[in-house]
Image: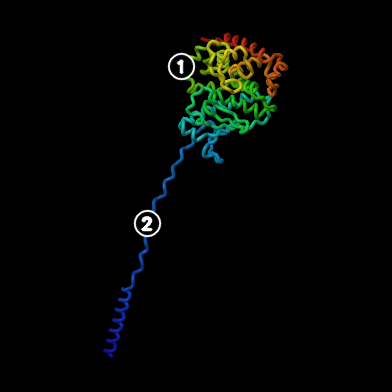
Amino acid sequence: MKTVRRSLALLLGLLLILCCAACGAQEPPAATETPAATEPPAATETPEPLPALSYPLEENTGSDAASYPYIVRTANAIWYLSAADMERVGRDAYFEWLDLVLKDQEADFDDARAVLAPWLMEEIPPVAIVTDFCAHAGEDTPFCDSAQYSKAQRKIRLYHGTGRALLYEYVRYLTFSCAKREISPGFYSEGVSEYVSHFACENRMLRMPSREFWREDLKKLYREIGVWDEESDSMDPALDCLYEAEIVRAQTAANIGVLYRSVSNGVLTRTEEINQHPSVDNISLEELGSLFAYLVETYGRETLFDHWDGDTADLKEVLGKDFTELYWDWAAWNTEQCEALGIVFE
């Protein structure tokens, strides 16, 4: 009995050994691979904070956002800010310039609307203004348009500067696109724009003392010729227009051969023939601006503006004199104004 038990014990022990050996012979389960360490996601650049301007700056979500990433809305305008311009002049400098302009632009545009109110529609949509400094980069001609209003697009494209161009082009927007009767191109449209922007409005954008334009040498020159306004510490647009008109018209010994921008929007060379026989198309914009100031003073704004959709051939019917007579009457008036206001010519 003991022998049998011993045999069974040996048999069970052998089976146990075999089972353990069999278990030890099995391949261990494959170790689960630890996934390779992945690169951490690239840190997202924090965009530069938008500068605080006089009017809120917003991101452009339209189809032209790549070219014009930001928009500024005021009551009178919607500005589209060019990415290329920011890169060209520097982002900080661009926004610093823009903020200076915005502070005066609204007041200037309000002034123009008030002057022209009797001839405008009641609802005046804000005009689109697109900065496009790069379009004329490197051009040194003084006759490069600093701004241009497109009637088809209802848009002002601003190439450089503001004071001499922006208010002028805004008046063109008002008279071409927002008037009860659209203004006639040429004599009337250019004359009204020159008169309103230089004589009827304060034109703060042009007077802006912080403009780079007012270098000390220019301040000295404008003081010497009598067109500097000490109270605002800036050049007076009306006085400057009188001065420039007199230079073009009366300084005949010096103006022969001089290039100038004419009413016909062409660049002409001043000749003795033009001096002796001025016409609606060949006088300068400065002459026309002062001429309109004279006509308004002599005949009244209503008399002149009520007929701005007419033709210069009708001037005699409207004012009692043809263009030639009006021109020489104005020439004498302009000389008298310059003398009375202390404007000096060397």
Quadrant location of residue 236?
top right
Q: Quadrant of the N terminus?
A: bottom left
Does residue 3 sit above or below 53 in this rendering? below
- Let me know if residue 69 appears in the view: no
Q: Which mark is residue 217?
A: 1
Q: Which mark is residue 36?
A: 2
Quadrant location of residue 238?
top right
Find residue 229 and report its horizontal and vertical position in percent: 53, 16
Q: Tell me which numbered mark, 2 or 1, is placed earlier along the sequence.
A: 2
Colour mode of the rendering: rainbow
Nearer to us of marks 2 and 1 is: 1
Q: For label 2, count other residues whose C-alpha is less than 10 Å away and answer few (under 14), some (14-19) or many (20+).
A: few
Identify the residue shown where x is 49% and y is 34%.
84
Q: Cα distance, mark 2 to mark 1?
A: 70 Å
Quadrant location of residue 130?
top right
The answer to whether the residues at label 2 and label 1 have Cβ atoms under 8 Å apart is no
Nearer to the camera, 215 or 210: 215
- Let me know if residue 197 appears in the view: yes
Nearer to the camera, 277 or 82: 277
| Mark 1: amino acid | Asp
Find residue 333 and report its horizontal and vertical position in percent: 62, 11
Q: Under tag 1, what secondary structure?
A: helix
Q: Which mark is residue 10?
A: none
Q: For label 1, count other residues whose C-alpha is less than 10 Å away and answer few (under 14), some (14-19) or many (20+).
A: few
Q: Under tag 2, what secondary structure?
A: loop
How many numbered discs, if any? 2
Nearer to the camera, 311 or 299: 311
| Mark 2: amino acid | Ala
Please, which residue is most extreme toward the bottom here? Answer: 1
Relative side of 159 to 279, left or right: left
